[in-house]
Amino acid sequence: MSTFDLLSDGISSFGAMIFIGLFFISFCFSVHLIVTWNPYHRPIIPLVCSILICTIPVTLLTMEADGSTSIGEMLEVVFLLTSLGAGMILLWLPIILSLTTIMMFSLTKRTPSPDPLIEMTEN
Amino acid sequence: MVFWVNQALLSFTLLIAAFSMWRMGPAFKRSRFAGPIALIGISGLIFLPEQPLYFENDYHRCELVSFCNDDGRESYLNVVKWSIISLFSSIFACFAIIKGSSIYSERNPTLLASGWIVLGFSWWTISQSPWFLEAYTRIDVIFWMVAFVLGVLASLYLFFRIVRFTEKLTPKDPPTAPLDEKERRLVTEMIRRNLGGRI
């Protein structure tokens, strides 16, 4: 039995990672549409699509030879895919933070303009 | 006892829900629940239940699932704790630097310095996370990161098309009828009172 390792456990091919990105955004989008439910936004079609994108692959991954599946196994696969997705986003953190640090450095060095309106029109 | 995998998934879902509610803006009443829900989600991620014992129902699941043993739980908890510390410290640092610099108000050197100290701390936490070092020294992980971004972009494009399709299905409103005499006089009076012009 191997340990839980975001870098080497489970799915690790290029195409599978594209799928994980698709699954992760669909999962977040479906949660977003449910908790911010507003009938005037007509969320039925996007919600059904995002739920289908999430559930169909998970059902196929957990399906046994006799066609049966269980909620527990589906939750475990969803946990694995969301954890891998969140882990992939976290792996971008040093790159994002280095860009943010450069921006913060320029903000720190910046001196206030005597007239921000004129500066804005000139730019 | 709740299986730790289920609790972690529920807590992560609550975090996404809290973020979505928070981004709804002040005009919606649901945004006030974002803070408490986010706190519940973070607490649920940090205070994970113990691994099931051999006489508990969920024990047999850990025999089948590779990440569900003691080491897996500890490893997951370690990543979550370090990530939360790194993320929160970097967000707080950026907020302090923006508030302390002279963008919106007078420069506040104390706030600015504390922001840079916290930003340095956040870089230190990243340098202490062994999986960042391991990830950036492996070419296959770099490829996975790029592939993941491609998946994210593909899903965003897909949902963009779905939303466009939904909007096209929305029936268009009929042309608005012109104002009748009574409405015209009312609007004229409103404009006259507000602008004071001679209409």
Image (cartoon, grey):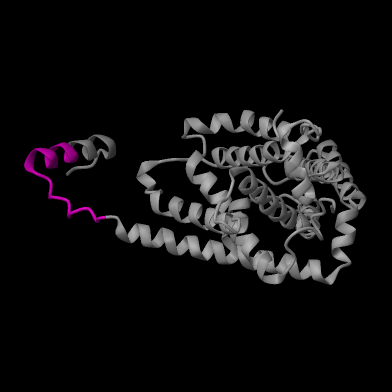
Residue B157 in the image: state x and y as whole percent: 52, 65
Residue visible at 86% across and 68% down in the picture: B138
Instruction: Say which of A84 and B153 sits in front.
Output: A84
On the picture, is A78 further left or further right than B69? left
Residue B2 in the image: state x and y as whole percent: 69, 31
On the picture, is A49 further left or further right than A2? left
How many marks do you count on the picture? 0
What is the residue that sits farthest to the front in this orientation? A66
On the picture, is B60 further left or further right than B168? right
Instruction: Say which of B174 and A51 sits in front.
Output: A51
Highlighted magenta segment, given as a residue range: B171-188
Above or below residue A65? Residue B72 is above
Residue B167 falls in image quadrant: bottom left
Residue visible at 70% across and 71% down in the picture: A14
Above or below residue B110? Residue A3 is below
The quarter in which the N terminus of chain B is drawn is top right
Instruction: Say which of B47 and A36 sits in front.
Output: B47
Task: Tell me, yes or no, if residue A123 can be seen here.
Answer: no
The question of residue B177 being in magenta is answered with yes
The quarter in which the C terminus of chain B is drawn is top left
Task: Tell me, yes or no, if residue B162 can be seen here.
Answer: yes
Residue visible at 71% across and 50% down in the picture: A83
The question of residue A4 being in magenta is answered with no
Residue visible at 85% across and 41% down in the picture: B70
